[in-house]
Image: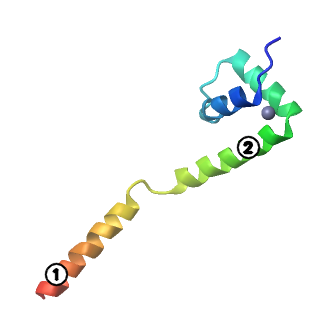
């Protein structure tokens, strides 16, 4: 008996998505996934979240904000 409960599942989702799980843990994880609709949905949601985060260029927002600020300074001194 090595069944996961839902709380353990949630704790393992990140490792699963990173592929950093050992084979036994992954087997337990997949077994739970097959039995539990709630966790299947949770995994799906987490996977989408991590994909959309990965698509964001790391510091584009900060860079945009900084150049907007520099433009504002320049036009003020103009
Ligand atoms: Zn579950």
Question: Where is residue 28 drawn, in percent x and y?
Answer: 77, 21
Taking the spot 75% from the left edge, 31% from the top edge, the residue there is: 6
Q: Is residue 57 above or below residue 18?
A: below
What quarter of the picture does the C terminus occupy?
bottom left
Q: Residue furthest right?
A: 35
Q: Is residue 18 left or right of residue 3?
A: left
Q: For residue 31, which quarter of the picture?
A: top right
The residue under the point 88% across, 31% down is: 35
N-term-proximal mark, 2 vs 1: 2
- Between label 2 and label 1, give the one nearer the viewer: 2
Q: Residues within 10 Å of mark 2 (few under 14, many from 20)?
A: some
> Is label 2 in contact with label 1 (beta carbons under 8 Å)?
no
Q: Residue at x 85, y 40 (%)?
A: 37
Q: Seen from this angle, which residue lies furthest top?
A: 1
- Cα gap from disc 2 to disc 1, whole angstroms: 48 Å
Look at mark 2 in the image and give the residue it sits on: 42
Disc 1: which residue? 74
> Of helix, strand and loop, which one carries label 1?
helix
Q: Position of residue 39 (x, y in %)?
A: 78, 38
Q: Secondary structure at mark 2?
A: helix
Residue 67 versus residue 6 in the image, above or below: below
Q: Is residue 51 above or below residue 19?
A: below
How was this image coloured?
Answer: rainbow
Report x, y in % for residue 25: 70, 19
Which of the 4 image quarters holds residue 69?
bottom left
């Amino acid at each position: 008996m090595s069944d996961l409960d839902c709380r353990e599942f949630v704790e393992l989702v990140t490792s699963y998505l990173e592929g950093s799980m050992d084979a036994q843990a992954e087997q337990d994880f997949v077994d739970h996934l097959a039995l539990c609709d709630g966790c299947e949905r949770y995994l799906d949601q987490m996977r989408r979240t991590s994909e959309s985060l990965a698509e964001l260029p790391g510091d584009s927002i900060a860079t945009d904000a900084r150049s907007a600020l520099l433009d504002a300074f320049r036009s003020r001194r103009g």
